[in-house]
Amino acid sequence: MSVQNLSQEGLYNLTVDLQEQIQGLETWKTYTNDNMDQSFLLTMGIIIYLMQGGFALLEAGSVRSKNTTNILIKNLLDSFVSGIFYWLIGYAFAYGSGNSFIGYDNFAHDGLKNTDYATWFFQYCFAATAATIVSGAVAERCEFVAYLVYSSMITGFIYPVVSHWAWSSDGWLGKGFEHTSGTTITYRDFAGSGAVHTLSGVAAFVGAAVMGPRIGRFDKETKRPEDIKGHSVPLAALGGFILIFGFLAFNGASQGSISGENDGAIVSIAIKNTVMAGSGGAFTTMFMNRLKLFGDAKWSFGITLNGCLSGMVSICSSCNEVETYSALATGIIGGVAYMIVTWLMLNKLHVDDPLDACAVHFGGGVWGVIALAFFSNEVGIFYHWNADSGLQLAWQLVGLLTIIVWTAVLSFIMFYILKKFDLLRVPFILEMKGLDIPKHGEPAYPTEAYGHGWGERGDALHTMVKQSVQSSSTTLVSADLSTPRIQRSKLALDSHKDIPRHKAEQPKFYLDVNKEHIDNAEKNGVVLRQDLPGQRSNENTKF
């Protein structure tokens, strides 16, 4: 064989060997990128999951000590309810193959590849967050069964359908439409100001409105809100810091990958803008609370924390495509939105939301969806004063209104049915004494520390009831709560015209209740009896 033939054969073999090595490198690059992206989603998802603990501590600190265990177990169960229903149907409705309205593939992970489980876990953490937000708005008075129902409904159907519209490749909002200029106008919501937070805020508002306020939250005649303080600022503070920590992952990880070109830069921009928006919201609400119109002229920790969270909610939609100063401005206006919604709910709508969940997530979320159409570098009105930017604002509003209507209608039907079947709200006497002991048998603190009638010494319950009493009402019942178990009797719903009016003749105190409270008390075998001056018998007397 000639030297020329040997050289040609060697060159051919070398070429084949190089091609095999290049193919091997391409394969290595592919699975390495896949592994990097899956690790990124899993790591950030675990951080987002920690927000469940943040919500639990924030809510526990913001409610009274008698309901601490109740709020903790509800937040704990969010993970499990969401896990089951998002596995069974939620993920399929959201990201399974389907039509422009809903997905209908991959039920119970059927047909899902092993490499897709990281995506499922990440999206599951978002779904669990959407359900947890609602629990704060109905705290201290929600029946346990009602919680299980609305949590499963939100994570299994209401939220997945909206996320399909916004984020699935088949969803009608995400697809958008093509303008005559050739530009495709799509709904832009990077981390869920609309799809997660506005949805949760609407559900929280409907739940709180249908359920009604906590006993003593509003004056019966003037409708003026009365303070019901939480029992632990340190717990609320720790929960707030955990939520801020989780928010950085919540927004940054919405890029969905870390292996592509500029992925790292986009994640960094999103996190940077989240910090700036939260800062703007915190300072805005802190100073607004100093104004008599909006606050109590104090430097409030709770208001400052909620302002920060509202700012972070408002930047979710656009955190990947705005400048730093735009993120700061978005957060500032998000803080203003929070203060306005809070004021409206308390002073005009008289809806009791112990955690201000609606104000934070609905107020911040609505503004966040709209803010993108103004501040976005790519499509914003302030940067591209043209027809396309105007259409972007219009499409953002279409998406926003659709999410609000969808969530409001389904939430109202769900909560109203629960109310009609007497499954929505706890009985009156349990709400007064607290839910930890009768519902769970696990007081969060020593029984003597409760002061709500469950075996403690002294007149703590007596004093608490007195503080909730209003001076005038159409239905008045005098209560003797000196013993742990109140005697059973029959309450009359007659007019109180025969009640003595002279100060010296007044009963010990009058407990202001309505017919719903009385019905609930009777159904649970608990009835209050009157104790008028000079009357010491155990017999019950009609008013």
Image (tube, grey):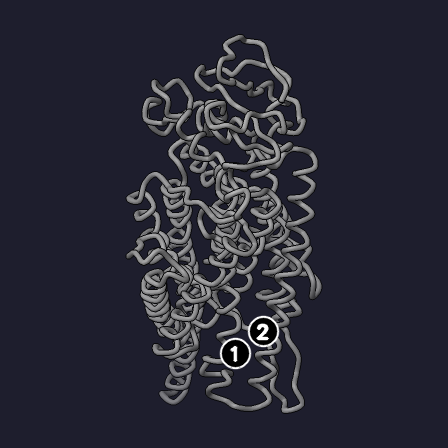
Q: Which numbered disc covers residue 373?
A: 1
- The answer to which quarter of the image holds residue 324 is bottom left
Which quadrant holds the N terminus?
A: bottom left
Q: Earlier in the sequence, mark 1 or mark 2?
A: 1
* Res 117 seen here: no
Q: Residues within 10 Å of mark 2 (few under 14, many from 20)?
A: many
What amino acid is at disc 2? Gln
What residue is rendered at 47% in x and 26% in y? 509
Considering depth in this image, is 105 or 125 the residue closer to the camera? 125
Residue 5: x and y in percent read 41, 86
> Is 417 situated left or right of 207 in this image?
right
Q: Which residue is mark 2?
A: 396
Which quadrant holds the C terminus?
A: top right
What residue is rendered at 31% in x and 54% in y? 300
What amino acid is at disc 1? Ala
What residue is rendered at 36% in x and 29% in y? 444
What residue is rendered at 64% in x and 57% in y? 161
Q: Residues within 10 Å of mark 1 (few under 14, many from 20)?
A: many
